[in-house]
Image (cartoon, grey):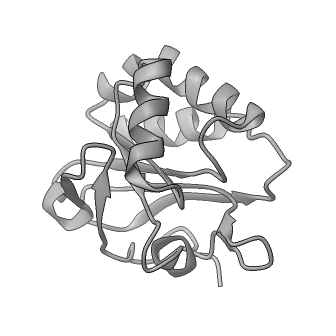
Amino acid sequence: MTLSVGDTAPDFTLNDSDRQPFTLSEHRGSPVLVVFYPFAFSGICTGELCQLRDELATYTDAGVQVVAVSTDPAPTLKAWKEQQGFGFPLLSDFWPHGEVAKAYGAFFETAGMANRGTFLVDADGKIAFAEVNGPGDARAQTGWKDAVAALAS
């Protein structure tokens, strides 16, 4: 089941690429953009996250914390983050495998990976934007930006 606008965002704690914990509920009071993607170092994922990196000010200037989540282990995420210069946390949903992606309805069970799910969690912990695309379907990021702009207004 995919989450919808208005639903309470499931809380989670995942380690980032430096094995430091990130807990969603600790960011209440400010919005968080949670971006699920299938795999580090893959073509579409690299394109999407590089665009996010290049346009990060769109989100941070609006007070939005951006995090990206995959089922990759932390060492893989660390290498990819260093290679690409991502300025936002890459979180590992490696074990229990895909549990956070499952909670958000963004897990592709057959392949054991996250789909391309995007969720904007508002300052109160509610879903303000929700979109889930299949693993081969690149996302247009205009919807995310529109949702961030709507929160700011």
Q: Is residue 35 left or right of residue 109?
A: left
Q: Position of residue 142 (x, y in %)?
A: 66, 31
Q: Is residue 8 above or below residue 113?
A: below
Q: Image point 65% across, 85% down: which residue?
A: 1
Q: Is residue 112 above or below residue 17?
A: below
Q: Is residue 58 above or below residue 89?
A: above
Residue 55 in sight: no
Q: Position of residue 25 (x, y in %)?
A: 20, 66
Could you tell me how many numbered marks the image carries? 0
| The quadrant where residue 126 appears | bottom left
Q: Image point 42% across, 18% down: which residue?
A: 85
Q: Nearer the viewer, residue 55 or 135?
A: 135
Q: Nearer the viewer, residue 12 or 120?
A: 12
Q: Is residue 71 left or right of residue 138?
A: left
Q: Is residue 113 left or right of residue 36?
A: right
Q: Is residue 144 above or below residue 121?
A: above
Q: Position of residue 32 (x, y in %)?
A: 34, 49
Q: Nearer the viewer, residue 83 or 145?
A: 83
Q: Image point 57% across, 31% down: which residue?
A: 49
| The quadrant where residue 28 appears | bottom left
| The quadrant where residue 102 appears | bottom right
Quarter of the image where the C terminus is located: top left
Residue 142 in sight: yes
Q: Image point 57% across, 22% down: which residue?
A: 50
Give the residue furthest to the bottom.
1
